[in-house]
Image (cartoon, coloured by chain):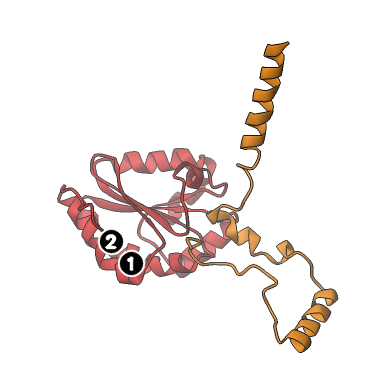
Chain colours: A red, B orange
Amino acid sequence: MSLDISAQQQLSSEKSLETELAKHKGKVIYLDFWASWCGPCRKSFPWMNQVQNKYAEQGFTVISINLDTEFELAQKFLKQNPVNFPVVYDPEGLLAKKYEILGMPSSFLIGKDGQVKRAHVGFFTKNQPTYEHEIKTLIENKALSTVH
Amino acid sequence: MKNKVKLTLLLTTSLVASGCTSLGVQPWERDLLAKKEMALSNGIDDSLDDHIYFSKEASSGGRSFGGGGCGCN
């Protein structure tokens, strides 16, 4: 969130993600890679705010990773799309490389055990119920179905 | 001598095999590719060319790289 930004900038992207992950250990995490120039990312923001509001108290959080090379562009985007979840800045794409993302946006659902349970490339309005269902299932500590 | 040949062969093949791994634009770098200064050429030359294509071949556009999108297809 906006207060954390200056502190985060001083840390490396990998360290700040580690810190965020540690802070939310044991929770279901929706890890989202985005950039200000990416259209579907813009579309995903209201939804991410919504699920954050809905499930935060049940042991869930969104953590987003911004991949803009220019910090100002990310700030402008966040002004237009205020968020209620943490943002990690990765201008050099180190985390993007580490997670081997294939498109923008990309998201990873991490279960309570800290393991990545599902990966999504792109954000599709018609798949919103599926995304939410997966979050709910993981919050209930159940296994995701293999068919999706 | 044989060992040396083997070693050079091994070195060259490994270099050749990994030579192109760092090329290409990653999905998160597409914003840079879409920047104006990344266009292959610009200015009056292009507009003249475009005019010729437009009037002779009834085609236009396709010169630059469109930005945005999810980059997944």
Q: Secondary structure at mark 1?
A: helix
Split into 4 quadrants, where in the image is the N terminus of chain A? bottom left
Residue B40 image point, x, y percent: 76, 64
Identify the residue position indicated by label 1 in the image: A47
**Alpha carbon distance from label 2 to label 1:** 10 Å
> Quick check: B47 left or right of B17?
right
**Mark 2 or 1: the one toward you:** 2
Chain on which label 1 sits: A
One can see residue B38 in this view: yes
Q: Residue furthest top?
A: B1
The amino acid type of the residue labelled 2 equals Tyr
Q: Is residue B18 left or right of residue A142?
A: right
Which image quarter is the C terminus of chain A in? bottom left
Q: Identify the residue at horizontal 59%, vertical 59% (top origin).
A: B30
- Residue A89, compared with residue B30, is above or below; it is above
User: Element at badge 2?
Assistant: helix
CB of mark 2 within 8 Å of CB of mark 1? Answer: yes
Q: Is residue A7 visible?
A: no
Q: Is A36 located above or below residue B12 in the figure?
A: below
Residue at the image point whose x is 37% and y is 43% from the top: A20
Please provide percent x and percent y for residue B8. 70, 21
Residue underneath mark 2: A131
Tell which subunit mark 2 falls on: A
* Residue kind at label 1, given as amino acid type: Trp
Answer few, some or many: residues within 10 Å of disc 1's Cα (few below 14, many 20 plus, some between 14 and 19): some
Whichever of labels 2 and 1 marks the residue nearer the N terminus, that label is 1
Residue at image point 67% right, 35% down: B16
Count of residue discs? 2
Percent coordinates x, y for residue A60 in the rendering: 25, 52
Quadrant of residue A46 in the image?
bottom left
